[in-house]
Image (spheres, rainbow, N blue to C red):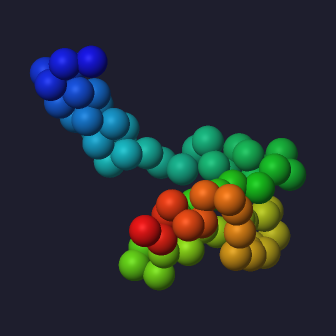
Amino acid sequence: MNDNQLDELSRQVLKALVADDGAAAKSHLAAGRPIYYYEDPDHLLIRKWQMDAASLFTSVLEGLLLS
């Protein structure tokens, strides 16, 4: 991937993030599946379930996220 393609991809990702209404996350929660999200500046990876239950999610990637 060249620099121009990477710039375009970055623009598309940012545009999608700005326009995100949470529908996919809500759909996963409604189906009984958890969602995962990164909470900054606390550097926490959170696993959230449908009934507002959330827990700290520890994974093998934790060291990478904190570095």
| Image point (86%, 52%), residue name | 32
Q: Where residue 27 sits: x, y (%)? A: 71, 44
Residue 8 shows in the view: no
Expressed as whole percent of the image width and height from the top left, the position of residue 21 reads 47, 48
- Give the residue drawn at x 29%, y 42%: 14
Q: Quadrant of residue 55?
A: bottom right
- Indicate left or right for 33 with 4 as reference: right
Using the image as rendered, state which of residue 30 and residue 48 is in the foreground. 48
The quadrant of the image that shows the N terminus is top left
Q: How many marks?
A: 0
Q: Nearer the viewer, residue 24 or 36?
A: 36
User: Nearest the camera: 43 or 20?
Assistant: 43
Above or below, 44 relative to 62: below
Splitting the image into 4 quarters, where does residue 60 fall?
bottom right
Q: In the displayed structure, does residue 29 sit left or right of residue 3?
A: right
Question: What x and y, as percent, mark residue 28?
Answer: 73, 46
Residue 5 visible, this orientation: yes
Q: Residue at x 42, y 73 (%)?
A: 40
Whole-percent x and y of residue 51?
Answer: 81, 70
Q: Quadrant of the C terminus?
A: bottom left
User: In this picture, is 42 found above or below 62?
Assistant: below
